[in-house]
Image (tube, rainbow, N blue to C red):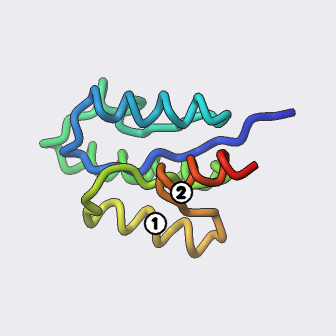
Amino acid sequence: MEQALAYVCCSAEESRVKVQKYCRKIYELGYVPICPRFVFSPFLEESDAEDMQGYGRMSHILLRRCRMVVVCGKDVTGTMNTEISMADRLHIICTTLDGLVQIKESK
């Protein structure tokens, strides 16, 4: 069976270690975590407006290819709201990490 892609939606303020834990948990639940922060941050500068526009475009391309969006962390930022809204418009499942755990445990 093919594993579903899960878009990791989290605040830019979350620590790298915390985001890695989110991704690991999603992986352990049987999904392929797709985290734009890890993919794009090595070569894009947060202080460069053009880079941030590119980050947004590329993140949306990845989001469209995922089966679900997993919202991680306690705070929801403006960028996260944009990702959640896009998922809603595209009829992509949107859940929290806790919700995903509950779904898997109920099976």
Residue bearing the label numbered 1 = 84
Q: Quadrant of residue 16?
A: top left
Above or below: residue 30 compared with residue 10: above
Q: Residue furthest front?
A: 106
Judge from the rendering whether residue 75 lies leftward or rightward of residue 30; answer left or right. Answer: left
Q: Label 2 vs label 1: CA separation? A: 15 Å
Instruction: Tell me the residue at 32%/50% (across/down).
Output: 73
The residue that disc 2 covers is 99
Which kind of residue does numbered mark 2 sit on?
Answer: Gly
Secondary structure at numbered mark 1: helix
Spot occupied by residue 19 in the image (x, y as percentages of width and height): 34, 35
Identity of the amino acid at label 1?
A: Ile
Residue 22: percent from the left, percent from the top?
A: 42, 36
Question: Looking at the image, is 70 positioned above or below residue 5?
Answer: below
Tell me if residue 40 comes above or below residue 13 in the rendering.
above
> In the drawing, does residue 64 fall left or right of residue 3?
left
Q: Position of residue 86 (x, y in %)?
A: 51, 68
